[in-house]
Amino acid sequence: MDFKRYLVTSALPYANGPIHIGHLAGSYLPADIYVRYLRSQKRDVKYVCGSDEHGVPITIRAMKEGVTPQEVVDKYHAMMKDSFEKMGISFDIYSRTSNKIHHETSQAFFTKLYKDHLFEEQESEQYYDEEKEMFLADRYIIGTCPVCGNENAYGDQCERCGSSLSPEQLINPRSALSNAIPVKRKTKHWYFPLNKYEGWLKEWIVEGKKDEWKPNVYGQCKSWIDNGLQPRAMTRDSNWGVPVPLPEAKGKVLYVWFDAPIGYISATKELTSQWADYWCKEDTKLVHFIGKDNIVFHCIIFPAMLKAHGGFVLPDNVPANEFLNIEGEKVSTSRNWAVWVHEYMNDFPDQQDVLRYVLCANAPETKDNDFTWKDLQDRNNSELVSIFGNFVNRAFVLMHKLCNGRVPKLHYDVMDEADKALLNAIHNTKAMAEADLENYKFRDALYEVMDLARKGNKYMQDKEPWIVAKTLEEKPENQKLIDNCLHLSLQLTANLAILINPFLPFTAKKMCYMMKVVDRMLEWENAGRIDLLKENYPLRAPELLFRKIEDAEIEAQVQKLHGGSKNEKVESKKSDNSAQTNNDQKMENNLENKTQEPIQAPIQKAEISIDEFNKMDLRVATILAAEKVEKADKLLKLELDMGNGEKRTVVSGIALHFKPEEIVGKQVTVVANLAPRKMRGIESKGMILMAQNPDGRLIFVSPLETAAAGSEVR
């Protein structure tokens, strides 16, 4: 469909704590990348979000801190809003569900369904605290877990063993508010008949979205629908939330999952008087960015509510992400196992784009993924610094040194195949990144942009304008070769600024400053052009886009995560299998990043004896087959001929430098007696030796003449 406008939402975060990087990776960063891309295309887009300030987590936090719920939401709303702004999450509005306009909008929505006789009134027995004179939400009931015996399990979950529970399953339940034994009392609530929309949901989702929605989203929705839908209560007994707008509903509020998604509507109302264009016109594309724990609410319950109300557009897509773990473990805010955004900004000021880059490059788009501080360091140092930043810096430094600080002329009469290949790469990268962005494949799109910077490095390294400059006295006409190399490198730099802008907006802005161009150049239609910087135009001196992150900085973050001690109790709780899995993951990460370390200068390592050296079994092998490892950007699976009929599988972190088909038949040097390790489920038996140039380019350590497979390297 030819959409006239776009409405993009990110899940409303609970205002009961700060923002951590799992939040960013799940729904805020991918949405921001998408929105920035749409804006660069000059499309009509609104990006709305806000704090979810109702529900049990808010009241629990207030109880723990000894303050009112309003004080809690005021504190964390301001903190979250500040974190989002500093990370460059570019909402058009960041509202809050405690606002008057939201109360009015959600109450009007409820009233419409009520007047249309869509709710079912049901009485049920629920736990009641006679001392506090209030019904208890599941989280306000504590008792002994029937599974593990934890005496402080909640009415919805035991945090010790992870079992999902109901209050009725608890042994010796008691009120978390007064410690009194709760009693059962009857209460009336209004239920939304979700079961009556089961047929429509089957048609809309199961039949209509099979080839459009991500498999994890579609699969979860289909499973829910196939298992049969039941009416769901849309009200709760509480004194904190949006009051139910009925005379007989005193002491009752709207269920938080009824009012929270309506917050998208109320925020749009607050943003613009033209809100109905974005919510009620069929040529609007509505896209929800969420984490996988919110799929059912955004794909089944909220769309059914919109359908029942009538007059609203339905979500065109819900590209939910999986979870981001931290150092091999699930995020746990209760035990502070998280990387908090406001703390990151304090520890790494003005390095928002480093975190944005790492979270996108390692995004949990198709499965749960893992954030490690070592990976952040490796990606920053070996990719942002040594590839992207290195190329831009070299282009500017050489332009100032060899072309008097001005954009040199492009001489078409001496253009060669390498020049033309670079131009093709610029055009192709725009097309590939655009296709990925339109299909919510942000990780792939970012890879394409970084790969273009990689190609720029190789192009400049092959051209060697600094070497050509030494021939000018004898061959002054070679200045044309220097001009062409640097002209195209600078045009590539301008294209990189446009293409990287949705991902790294702070970096793109720095690049615009260095190029002395206005931000308007970052419009997407300019990508692919090679006349963005005019001939003889003076450019500013280069500034480093990124800095190297030192080991000590990473160690400090790891210590902070572990509470200052590597031997903290949380470490001892890991099972042997979990520990082995984490070790294997670290091995894989090391292999992926081993060949990406920037080389500043040769470093003399500790001396070893000849006996220690002789322990290594170095052999010549021939690559028989090569293929990319699924869901691992940097790994290739190689089948090697080791001689004497022996074939081995080796996993090597060289996929960013070589295409599989290019290296088949290549002779390589292998550490043949390296202990086997599994990576991505593949057992790797050995390690390929590589040399790395200062520009990051890899070279196989191979014999000058063909050697028999299995030959020993002495």
Image: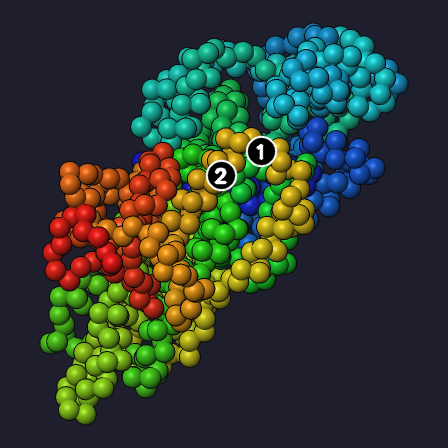
Res. 149 image quadrant: top right
Report the residue marked by disc 2.
582
Residue 128 appears in view: no
Query: How many neighbours does mark 1 have within 10 angstroms: few (below 14), some (14-19), or many (20 or more)?
Result: few
- Residue under the image location 66 percent in, 47 percent down: 565
User: Tag 1: residue type?
Assistant: Lys
Q: Is residue 616 left or right of residue 475?
A: right
Q: Is residue 287 left or right of residue 551?
A: left
Question: Furthest-bottom residue in view?
Answer: 473
Q: x and y percent of residue 99 in the render? A: 68, 39
User: Tag 2: residue type?
Assistant: Asn
Report the residue marked by disc 1.
574
Q: Nearer the viewer, residue 64 or 711?
A: 711
Q: Earlier in the sequence, mark 1 or mark 2?
A: 1
Res. 392 image quadrant: bottom left
Q: x and y percent of residue 283 in the render? A: 38, 36
Callout 2 secondary element: helix
